Each structure stands twice: as structure tokens, then as C-alpha cells.
Amino acid sequence: MDPALRPSIDEVWHWLAEVPDPEIPVISLTDLGIIRDVAWREDTLVVTVTPTYSGCPATTIINLDIETALAEKGLSKVKLERQLSPAWTTDWISAEGREKLRDYGIAPPIDGTAADGVLMKRIDRLSGRSNLTIACPRCGSANTEKISQFGSTPCKASYRCTDCLEPFDYFKCI
């Protein structure tokens, strides 16, 4: 592609911000923080993607959605690169993404609780032995209880608010 005719990196980021996550369509791939880099290498646009975890079942669909969105904008030479290190963390979800999750009825991850390299804290959190207070995304109450460590997708846990009695998902910290 002629460098004078190709879109700017900022424009490509804007396009990618419109691609929804296939499992949680209210949040974009850029809000989720899995698009790590966008760069031109000669006439090829290279998009670097870090999956939420290496076995994420949505990875193939995410890649297809990225390629489709960019093809619709006229880009025919696109290369997707998978970057596993550093591993994705919920800390990479944007502030806007966290609000979108909450508005959608999913409790966003609590700041500072993602994998921080402290093994015992992570084991306690994942086993349910930690004392995290997950606020209800519907009424804001802190009176909630975990129903199951496993929710509607592998990255979510099931909770229930004991005040409004509504069930909700919590986006687990990874």
C-alpha cells in the first residue's frame, strides 16, 4: 500500500475500538486491553494481540473479527501476531471498559487484585479464601455472595446480591 494512502495508526486504533469482544459485546477489544500494538511494516499492517489466557475459546473469533473489520476499511495486507508475554491481566481493561462492564451488569475486576506475582495471594483469591468485596453492578451494594467460581464464560464468576437479590457475573482478576 502506498504510504501516502494508508491510514494512520491512530485511525486504525479508532477502527479497532469499534470491534466488540465476542463473549462480552458491550466492551471493545481495545477496552479489554488485548490489542497490544498496531504498526506498519512496509506495506503490511501488523496487529499484536494478547489473548486473555492462552486457552481462550474466543481467540479464533477475535482474530477473524479484527481481520474482517480491517478488510471492511480496505486493508488487505494484515498480519496478526500473538504475544503471550507479558501475560494479559485485568489491569489492562480501560476505565471506560470497566464502566461499560458495570453498566452491562457485570462487576468489573477490582483494581489491584490482578496477578501481581505473589503466588499465595493469587491462590487465596482464586480459591475463594480472600475477603474481596464485590459490589453489585445493579444496586451498588457490597452485600454479595459468590455462587460459583465459574460463570457464563471462563473469565467470570457467578455472584448474587443479598440486597436486591439479583444474580450477576464478576469479571475475575487474572
Image (cartoon, helix red, strand yellow):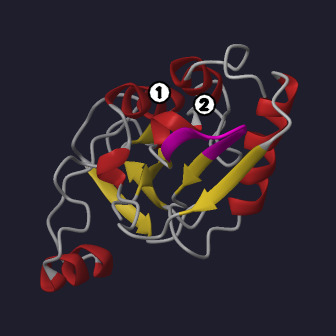
Q: Main secondary structure of the magenta part?
A: strand
Viewer-proximal residue, 163 or 149?
A: 149
Q: Which residues are magenta?
A: 36-46
Q: Say whether marks 1 and 2 touch (CB < 8 Å).
A: yes
Going 54% across and 39% down the picture, which residue do you hit? Answer: 38
Viewer-proximal residue, 79 or 24?
A: 79
Look at label 1 and name its amino acid. Lys
Look at label 2 and name its amino acid. Val
Q: Residue 143 — which label?
A: none
Task: Kindly identify which residue carries mark 2.
Answer: 26
Q: Earlier in the sequence, mark 1 or mark 2?
A: 2
Q: Is 153 placed above or below 29 here?
A: below
Does dot 1 land on a helix, a strand or a loop?
helix
Q: Quadrant of residue 74?
A: top right
* Camera sees residue 18: yes
Q: Quadrant of residue 119?
A: bottom left
Q: Percent from the top left, x then y, of residue 78? A: 75, 44
Task: Kindly identify which residue carries mark 1.
Answer: 100
Going 43% across and 52% down the picture, which residue do you hit? Answer: 171
Whether the magenta-drawn stretch holds residue 38 is answered as yes
* Left or right placement of residue 49 versus residue 117 in this view: right
